[in-house]
Amino acid sequence: MARTHLSAASPSSPRNARERSANGHDKQAEIFSTAVRIFKEKGYHAASMQDLADAVGLQKASLYHYIDSKEDLLLAVWQRGTGALTAQLTELAAAPLAPTEKLRRAIESHLVALCAQLELFTVYIREQNVFNGREKTRLRAEGRRHAQLLESILEEGVASGEFRALDVKMTTHAILGMCNWLYQWYSPEGELGAREIADLFADLIINGVKATPRKMKTKRAASRRPRKS
C-alpha cells in the first residue's frame, strides 16, 4: 500500500499523528475532486476505480484505504451538492426579506454555486438515477426539502400580493429546471459571468411571477378591509 512520507519524529508523537491525519485528508480531498472530474468526463458508469487510481497515483488496492466504493464517491457528490444549496435556501427562506428579494437571492445563490463548482454539479444533476433503494429514497427526500423551501418563498409572495396566483409546485419545478439546465451550456470563458447570468434569470423569473400593480393594490386593500363581526 502506498504510504505518505513520515518525518523522523517518533511514530507516536502528536506532531507525527497530525501530519498523517493531514496527509490522509489531503489525499481524500484529491481523490474526491479527481473522481468528480472523471465522472464528468467519462460518465459514472464508464468510469472505473482503475481510472481513479491511475489519476491519483495509487495502486487500485491502495485506493480502498481511503474510500469504500465508487458509489460512496457519488453519494458524497450528492451530499455536498444538496447540502450546499439547501443550507443557503434554508437561511434565505427564514430571512426578514420581501418575497421578491428572497426569490432573487435564491436564484442567484443557486446559479453562482453551480457555476463555481461546475464539474460537481454536472455530475450531481446528470447522475441522478444511479441510486436505488434506501439511498434513492433519502436523496429524493433531500431534493424534496429543497423544493419545499422554494415553494414556501413563492407561497409567501402570493399571500402578500407580490406574486400573482400561481401553481406553486409547477412553478418551482420550472425554476429549478431552468437553473439546473445551466450545466449543459455554461462556460467560464463565455461572454457572461455567473452573476450576470443570475441577474438575467432572476429578472425573467420574477417578471413572470409578479402580480400586476392593479392586482397588488386590490390584494393590499382587501387585507386592510375590516372583517365583519
Image: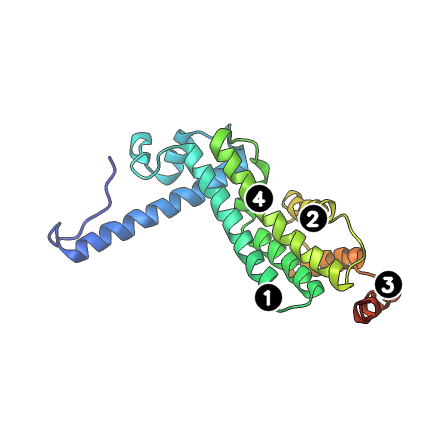
Quadrant in the rendering for residue 61: top left
Q: Earlier in the sequence, mark 1 or mark 2?
A: 1
Label 3 neighbour load within 10 Å: few <14, some 14-19, many 20+: some
Q: Earlier in the sequence, mark 2 or mark 3?
A: 2
Q: Earlier in the sequence, mark 1 or mark 4?
A: 1
Label 1 neighbour load within 10 Å: few <14, some 14-19, many 20+: few
As helix, strand or loop, the secondary structure at mark 1 comes to: loop
Tag 1 and tag 2, C-beta contact below 8 Å: no
Q: Whole-Å distance between the Cαs marked 2 and 3?
A: 22 Å
As helix, strand or loop, the secondary structure at mark 3 comes to: helix
Tag 1 and tag 3, C-beta contact below 8 Å: no
Assign the N terminus to one quadrant of the image.
top left
Label 4 neighbour load within 10 Å: few <14, some 14-19, many 20+: some
Q: Is residue 44 above or below residue 156?
A: above
Q: Which residue is mark 2?
A: 172
Q: Earlier in the sequence, mark 4 or mark 2?
A: 4
Q: Whole-Å distance between the Cαs marked 1 and 2?
A: 19 Å
Mark 4 vs mark 3: in front: 3
